Image (spheres, rainbow, N blue to C red):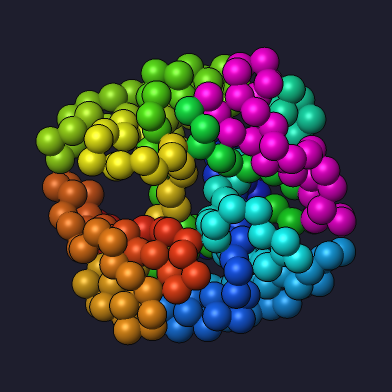
Amino acid sequence: MPEVKRHKPGTFCWTDLTTSDLEGARVFYSELFNWGLRESESSDHTYTMMQAGGVDVVGMGQPPELHGPPAWLCMISVADVDAAAAKVREAGGVVHEGPFAVDDAGRMAVCADPSGATFGLWEAGIHQGAGRVNEPSTPCWYELASRDTAASAAFFKEVLGWEAQSGPMGGAVYTTFLRGPAPVAGMLAMTEEWGDAPSHWMVYFQVASCEETAQRAASLGGEVCVPPTEIAGVGRFAVITDPQGAVFSIMQMHR
């Protein structure tokens, strides 16, 4: 796939890891996905751009104080982050941080929908977001696990104009969020099997082999929480926790 120059408003554009051990995370992910590293000094901590094919695809940093466990933050492109943050509040969501400027890279806000799932809003400056997507070692899908799918669907329709389309998948009901005719994300309902886990967004990284990547993650100190599993007509996925505790998924697409 050619390099992505711009992400349309209302689509996911960037994924950001906040970790308790930046050096350990860089080693784990660079060896797992064969990512290159590009250092970027922010105003308060070192931030690393991880690269695939010579372009930035995700970022990771270790703030001076970590509020909450290590986690990936999934970020959505918007034309005006201040206006979008206002819509979040009007629609019953919460703006936890911002909007604020990230030097000349852009402006962002950290928000949560009514179910409590955290996500980011990004108004691009010189940083548009991931330069490659939907190919091995890059983000390929975003999925919301919600404890109130009706509230989440109504919220994202009001804030971002997403339409929710639901249907059976793997013995459960799966919702696809659409921006116009194009799918932008998925959603599933959290059941008792999830225990006390909060609502959350999950990033999926595309891989050539789900089995091989899961085995490599385990050998590097990660934990395979959900082993490679088939989704009929879609591909094979697995859920992994990195050595610092951040959770992500991998997907081998059937094409």
Residue situated in front as seen by the camera: 200 or 56? 200
Give me the residue at 29% from left, 42% from top. 194
Q: Is residue 223 above or below residue 123?
A: below
Q: Is residue 222 above or below residue 115?
A: below
**Residue 180: image x %, image y %?**
47, 26
**Residue 67: image x %, image y %?**
65, 53
Q: Is residue 132 magenta?
A: no
**Residue 44: image x %, image y %?**
83, 65
The answer, for residue 149, to whether it is visible in the render is yes
Looking at the image, residue 103 sits to the left or right of residue 164; the answer is right
Give me the residue at 68% from left, 72% from top. 48
Residue situated in front as seen by the camera: 109 or 3? 109
Residue 38 lies in quadrant: bottom right
Give me the residue at 78% from left, 69% from top. 45
- Pick the quarter of the image with the C terminus: bottom left
Residue situated in front as seen by the camera: 78 or 53? 78
The answer, for residue 54, to whether it is visible in the render is no
What range is drawn magenta here? 87-114
